[in-house]
Image (cartoon, rainbow, N blue to C red):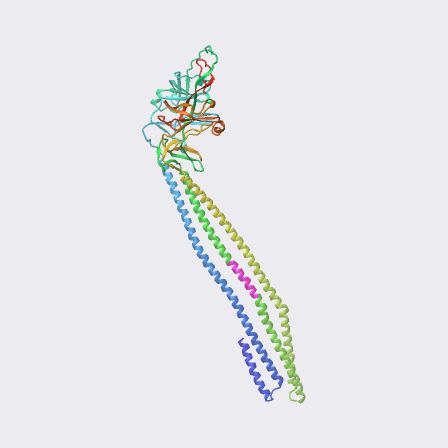
Amino acid sequence: MSLAARKLELANERLARARGLADRGLLAPGQVQGDQAAVDRARARSDASARELKRLKTSRHTRKLLELDAALAEAAERFEQASADAGAARKTQARRLAASQLSVKALMGQLEQLENRRGQATIVAPHDGIVLHPVVAIPGGGTSTVRGPLRRPGDELRKWEPVVMLAGRLRSRVQATLSGADGTRVRVGQPVTVRVADEGAGSVEFHGTVSRVNALDRTSPQERRVEVVLPVLSSTAHWVGQPVSLKIEVANDDPAAAVQTQPVTSGRVEGHLFERGQVERADGLPVRLVADRPAVISRIIEPGTVVKAGETLVEFDTESLEADISGQAVTVARAAAALSAQQRRLADVRSKSRRNISAAKLAVETATLDLEEFQEMTFVQSRGVLDREISGLIENQRRAHARLVWAERVLKKGYITRAALEADRLVVTEVENKLKEARGRLGLLIDHTRVREMKRRESQLASAKNESARIQRETSALVAREMANEAALSSAQQMETARLTRWKRQLAASTVKAIRDGVVVRYVPAPSAGADTERVGAGSVVHPGQPLLVLAPSSGGPATVRLNSGRTDLVETGQAARIHVRGDTRRELPGRVSRVLSENIFGAEQQGPGVCAGLDRHAGGTGCPGAHAGRDGAREGEGEARRCPEGAEPGRA
């Protein structure tokens, strides 16, 4: 632009000198016009240079601004990502440290459990007594095979399996169950020979007598439980728990005497109905296992204990559950650390994606600027240069032709030589050749160079757009994959946390506390076919929802005896009943029939209809809930009286 301005200044000075010479008649008018044309061309070149400089500055400024904006955005993105990475790394490291601490805590808990087990390896007798080895029954083939009670070194024991038993005293009794016709032939006082297998002596025989014969159940009237008194057993525990064989001397039955008959008469008779049942509280609140998986009882309060609200009733074994919770806490911490690392990775991927997309957009904008710059500046500038050059050559050609005409005219007058004329003619030829060359370069610029450069820059622009689209697709897929991984890790963490929470609730439920003041009584299930009435204790496995005991408001409350009766047609509400507690024949509790349930109502819990007898409140005492009791119900009514033969045993009603 400075050069164009200087040329314009020189052209103006030359024009001023030419006009001065023309005024004095020293120059021809054509020469002045040529200087004026030169000034116009110089002014046009100066204006064009100014416009091109302005366009060039605008293009460079725009390109520079784009580059600076992109660099600033990238720097801000990197700074933000570095800050986020630092925070995420700190959180991830903290969570990993927490996971490591929990792992160490879990290992310390396992070590403590192992130390406790080592301390439990030695069992000390809590009181004086006699050591007995437990007898283990091995089921097989429909019967139970009794394994020897001896404990030997190397025996494998399961958790909560009895190791030895400590008895304060020994009872000199042998109990056996007889079935079939043999059970009905056994009587009290019959002599018995008891044979015990001994490893050292081979076999040992003891002699005793039958002390008691009891029927087991109404459903099997021929089964009898026989007790044999052996005083020798009270002096040693060597044979306690050993399988024995009994030989009971049963005398031959006398021939049946002639049956005496008596005519049947009608009238009111008084009869008794004997049934077996269990005492249960009518106002108790069952305490159940609320966990969602089976548990083993480690300690349970004894029935009859008076408790206050908040006192512990049942404690379950939580050793395995605590180990699971410790391991699960480590798993949750590791899942949280993995989720934090994945979130950091996702943030890094998003930052890189934004930077790549920004770089791709910058490439597209740069290619667009290059194309526009070539169309509006480079090509226009090159064409303007050629156009001005052609214009100057045309003016030079006109001036050369004018000078040649002037030279031919003055040559005739003899003012110049032939050599000067030929020189002017050569100048005309040279100018025409330059003009032809310039027009050829202009045609090449328009027809070839412009087309080639346009195609190249359009191709660069299309390639930049395709690359930008590809980067966007790839970054979107990469971000989607990382987000899916984050969602999976988040779901896994939620699942592990929910499992840990559930196990913690189970741990909290492993200690059952009293919700009110009251007295603890034994839970008695409704009598039914196959009902398990065994008492739960330490080592018992209980299932979710299973009742463990009953919390009654106070001792001495209302109690009932639930019975299974096959003759409910003989039982009515309000009939008197006498209740005897098994094991205490001298204790008799008065009561009355409170309800007679039909088979439709009571059949859901037992087979057949049922009877519920209530104990009188004014009785001297109530039976312990869960104790087996027998009911003797008196009834008067119309019926037929039949006489049984003497010596015959009445069937159970």
| 22 to 372, vertically: above or below | below
The residue lying toward the viewer, choosing from 568 and 424, is 568
Seen as rendered, the residue at the extreme top is: 258
Would residue 621 be counted in the magenta stretch? no
In x, y percent, where is residue 18? Answer: 58, 85
Quadrant location, the C terminus = top left
Can I make out residue 324 in this image? no
Residue 359 in the image, given as x and y percentages of width and height: 52, 60
Task: Find out whether residue 363 is within the magenta segment.
Answer: yes
Residue 379 visible, this angle:
yes
Tell me where residue 475 appears, x and y as whole percent.
53, 55
Q: Dividing the image into 4 quarters, which one contains the N terminus?
A: bottom right
Q: Quadrant of residue 193?
A: top left
- In the visual, does 469 lie left or right of 260? right
The answer to which of 123 and 626 lies nearer the viewer is 626
Magenta: main secondary structure equals: helix
Q: Position of residue 213 (x, y in %)?
A: 41, 19
Q: Magenta span covers which residues?
A: 355-370
Q: Is residue 51 left or right of residue 214?
A: right
Q: Residue furthest left?
A: 128
Query: Is residue 307 found left or right of 408 in the rendered image?
Result: left
| Residue 366, placed above or below residue 505 | below
Left or right position of 544 against 399: left
Count of numbered labels shown in the rendering: 0
